[in-house]
Image (cartoon, grey):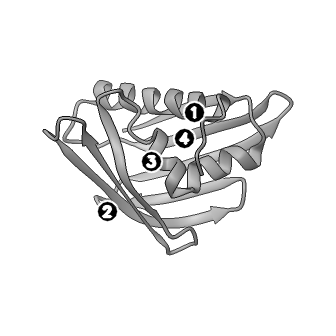
């Protein structure tokens, strides 16, 4: 099953792209929840390059590792990745008069509750939007 999550972000395309692809900035938004954080983000941004993100609960009770390969890149327009578990994600960036639209198509994990995963991805996109729009970027 695949879902689409989108956000209209009041920021220039270049700033949105940078926030999505810069490890130090990814660490700021990639947990998306007050009781989680992203202590590590590695990005080798080119087709065939890899990524790795570690997400942890603040109390240390859970650790999630996400990794994969950049399958296709179009500068400031498209990122397609394949997670190490075989799922796919595509992120489309489109500048418009209101800023930048980011649209993600995400293949969900078959072993987990679809509704829970959809809520998590929507929350993550919302948190990404908030970080970018409030200029809380620390890159």
The residue indicated by pointer 1 is 131
Q: Distance between the residues labelled 2 and 4?
A: 18 Å
Describe the element under mark 2 as helix, strand or loop. loop
Disc on the earlier residue, 3 or 1: 3
Residue at mark 3 to residue at mark 1: CA–CA distance: 11 Å
Please tell me how crowded label 1 is: few (under 14), some (14-19), or many (20+) other residues with Cα within 10 Å: some
Q: Residues within 10 Å of mark 2 (few under 14, many from 20)?
A: some
Please determine whether, in this image, residue 105 is positioned above or below residue 41: above
Q: Which of marks 2 and 3 is nearer the N terminus?
A: 3
Q: As drawn, is 20 to the left or to the right of 53? A: right
Toward the front, the furthest residue is 138
Q: Is tag 3's residue or tag 4's residue first in the polypeptide sequence? A: 3
Q: Mark 3 points at which residue?
A: 27
Determine whether 125 is above or below 67 in the image.
above
Q: Residue 104 carries which label?
A: 4
Residue 86 in picture, x, y percent from top left: 32, 59
Answer whether labels 2 and 3 touch (C-beta < 8 Å).
no
Residue at 78% in and 33% down:
99
Residue 45 as seen in the image, left or right of residue 41: right
């Amino acid at each position: 099953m695949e879902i689409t999550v989108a956000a209209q972000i009041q920021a220039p395309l270049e700033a949105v792209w940078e926030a999505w692809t810069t490890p130090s900035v990814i660490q700021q938004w990639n947990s998306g929840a007050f009781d989680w954080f992203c202590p590590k983000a590695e990005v080798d941004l080119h087709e065939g390059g890899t990524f790795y993100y570690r997400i942890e609960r603040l109390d240390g009770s859970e650790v999630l590792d996400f990794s994969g390969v950049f399958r296709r890149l179009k500068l400031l327009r498209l990122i397609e990745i394949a997670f190490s578990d075989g799922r796919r994600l595509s992120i489309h960036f489109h500048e418009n008069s209101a800023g930048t639209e980011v649209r993600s198509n995400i293949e969900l994990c078959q072993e987990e509750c679809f509704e829970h995963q959809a809520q998590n991805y929507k929350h993550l996109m919302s948190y990404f939007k908030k970080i970018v729009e409030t200029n809380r970027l620390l890159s």
